[in-house]
Structures are given as structure tokens and as C-alpha cells.
Amino acid sequence: AQKITQTQPGMFVQEKEAVTLDCTYDTSDQSYGLFWYKQPSSGEMIFLIYQGSYDEQNATEGRYSLNFQKARKSANLVISASQLGDSAMYFCAMRAFTGANNLFFGTGTRLTVIP
Amino acid sequence: GAVVSQHPSRVICKSGTSVKIECRSLDFQATTMFWYRQFPKKSLMLMATSNEGSKATYEQGVEKDKFLINHASLTLSTLTVTSAHPEDSSFYICSARVGGSAYEQYFGPGTRLTVT
């Protein structure tokens, strides 16, 4: 079974600054993927970034980067140059590529960008 | 990216009635679709997984007779909440996975169900 932990219920960041959202996970699977999604107040889930467990380099997508530390089982999301539009809920998720193969989510972090 | 639609976006129904929510993959074929439920300020909880043409697989604790899922085609899955009660009020989100993909899974915009 997988477990995803996001210990920060809420975070604040000044506009144009960088922010790190924490995510740790627990799994016995060797092959898995880690995801970050953004959920604005409208409710839709927006895919941000993906990291495979065998990827040697940290994933980056524009202002988003994933700080993947496999030994520590952490997959923190770093948002650089925060914008007001970044204010939203952010969910870390994990999918093992064996067994049921489903996507499971952490409890989320609400990010507020301050002008 | 691929688009997943849900209909309706909002629905209000009376207690005891049934409500059907549709999930469509608009520009790709989804061999697997997922239904999630999200309570206010909470995370998404996987309810069930459905594969086209076969019975849905429900997560532990989800009543399969209450939440009927049909995945009749590669582009359409439906969730029917039968004999709805106020405690069924929630945000329901569907998701579709591209067949054979390593990780691409796309989410619909969600349906807010309110049972009065």
C-alpha cells in the first residue's frame, strides 16, 4: 500500500519569491511515479509535474521543479518566482506501476501568494 | 493536453432520488477511468476504477450498489448515485488514463452534488 504525506496544511509566499511544498511517501514498490497537481478554487485538477522513480534527474517544467530524494522518499515541489495566480491547493500524488496501479493523493497544501 | 469533460457541473437533487454524472474523454480513448470523491478542504479519495466493457473495481468502504459505475465505451463513463442522501453531497471528479501510457492521467472539472 502507498501512503502520501503532506505536512503543510497552508503556506504563504511573497510574490516573486520561491516556495517549497513538502511531500513524503511510503511504498514497497520499486517502480512508481510521483505527481503534483494544482487545484484552484474552480475545482479542476491541473497536472504540474511528474517524476519517475528511476529518473536520475529531477523533473522541471517551467517554474516548477521537483526535488526528488529517493533515499529519503521525498518529492518536494519548488515553485520559483511565485505569481498571484499560483494561489491554490497543491496535491502530491503517487502511482505504483504494479498491482492496482492507481493514483493516490496526499492531503494537500493550500498556497497563498501575497502581493 | 487531453480533455476530459463532466456533466453536469452542478446538480441539486432531493433526498431519495438518483443522479447520473457523465465523464467523457473528448479527444482520446480512455481504457481506464477513475472516480474520485472530495469533501470540502479535503483530499481526493479514489472511489472506483472502471475499465471499458468490464465491471468497476471499488475501493474498500465504497458501496457498489449505491454508486453505480458504467464504462460503456472508450470515451464515456457514468457514475449514478442511487437513492441519494444529504451525506452523499460532495465534489465528484472523474479521471481518464490514456491506454498504454506510463503516467498520463487527465481529470475532469468535477461535479458538485448537493442533496437536500
Image (cartoon, rainbow, N blue to C red):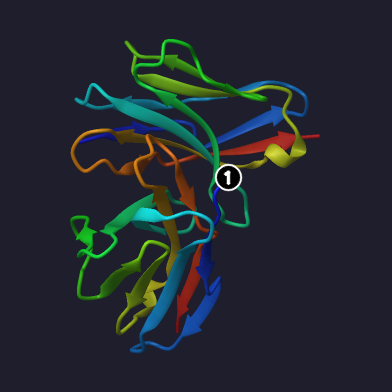
Residue located 39% across and 54% down the image:
B30
Determine if residue B110 is in view: yes
Residue A10 picture location, percent across and down: 55, 37
Residue A65 visible in the current orientation: no
Q: Left or right of A21: which side holds A106?
A: left
Q: In this view, does A74 lie to the left or right of B61?
A: right
Question: What x and y, as percent, mark residue A81?
Answer: 74, 23
- Name the element at disc 1: loop
In the rendered image, which quarter is residue A94 located in? top left
Question: Looking at the picture, does residue A109 appear above or below residue B22?
Answer: above
> Image point 37% across, 32% down: which residue?
A5
Mark 1 belongs to chain: B
Residue B107 location (% of width, % of height): 49, 52
Residue sitting nearer the eye, A107 or B112? B112
Q: Specify the amino acid type for callout 1.
A: Gly
Q: Toward the viewer: B27 or A92?
A: B27
User: Which residue carries the number 1 mark?
Assistant: B1
Q: Around disc 1, counting alpha carbons within 10 Å, would you say few (fewer than 14), some (14 to 19), or many (20 or more)?
A: few
